[in-house]
Amino acid sequence: MAGSTNIALVPVEGDLDVTSVASLRQTLNALIDGGCKRIVLNLAATSYMDSAGMGLVVASVRRMRARGGLLSLTNVSPEVMRALSIARLVDFIPVSSAGSRPETPELDPSALPRWRTVLRIDPKNLTATRRHVSELIDRMPISGDDAFDLGLAVGEAMGNAVDHAGGCSLVDVACYADRAVVEVSDCGDGFTPADAKQPVDDTAERGRGIALMRLLTDAVTIAPKPSGTGMVVRIVKLLRA
């Protein structure tokens, strides 16, 4: 997973304690040293975390933040959540509990955005387009961690659009009272909504982007454009300043 990986979902297999931290430390260090900017530790199989595990998490969070990245924990059991709360780690590490994520409420059809900007995605300078989108996100009343995740998710969508359709892709960034809504559209034909429902193969070279977008944001929908050819990826992130 190291090297060019920009976002990584790392499953923790079993309890995170003094007997298992060495293996996870090796994985995390390889990702961080390889330039990974976003790491999500999936603790679905973890029912216990001792001080050694907490120490590893804290050290990794500090290393990530020092390099402009972010590490978070997801699918945290009630037992582990209590331990993290007692240790006050939940105060500076993004943590989400185990269980299904609540559905994101639909946007009121009568709601108007506070502002909206549409950009053409430059396939020859995707970095510049990502930077412009990040500047727009920074204008929103949103926490730094949420802004970081939204920027990564939109970057994934824009990369997919360029891959599918090259130079005819757009990104529409809108700020509403309670949410950011970003739509990335293309004019290609290399993707269908059914592809988004396929399970992600950890050994596959491609197919991870959609799952990662959904992990980083509150809602992602994929649909054909209302007219012409191509698809629209709609990303929603609720504003929690």
Image (cartoon, grey):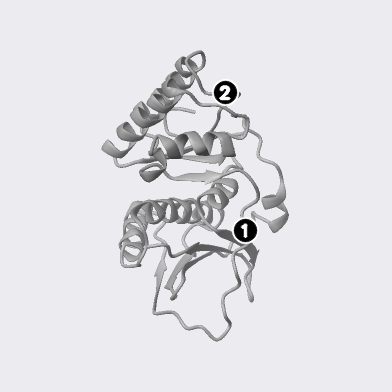
Q: Looking at the picture, tell me which residue is in the foreground, 64 or 7.
A: 64
Label 1, secondary structure: give it.
Answer: loop
Residue 94 screen position, x and y as percent = 43, 45
Mark 1 Cα-neighbour bin, 10 Å: few <14, some 14–19, many ≥20: few
Q: Residue furthest left?
A: 66
Residue drawn at 64 percent across, 75 percent down? 226
Q: Residue 102 got which mark?
A: 1
- What amino acid is at disc 2? Asp
Using the image, determine if residue 26 lies above or below residue 113: above
Residue drawn at 46 percent across, 61 percent down? 167
Q: Is residue 4 left or right of residue 234?
A: left
Residue 124 screen position, x and y as percent = 38, 54
Mark 2 Cα-neighbour bin, 10 Å: few <14, some 14–19, many ≥20: some
- Residue hosting label 2: 15
Separation of disc 1 and disc 2 at Cα? 26 Å
- What amino acid is at disc 1? Pro
Q: Is residue 229 left or right of residue 166?
A: right
Q: Looking at the picture, tell me which residue is in the foreground, 92 or 42.
A: 92
Residue 39 screen position, x and y as percent = 45, 37
Residue drawn at 61 percent across, 53 percent down? 101
Rendering quarter of residue 123? bottom left
Circles 1 and 2: CB atoms closer than 8 Å: no
Using the image, determine if residue 53 lies above or below residue 69: above
Residue drawn at 32 percent across, 56 percent down? 131
Q: Residue furthest bottom?
A: 110
Q: Earlier in the sequence, mark 1 or mark 2?
A: 2
Q: Residue furthest front?
A: 86
Can the viewer see residue 195? yes
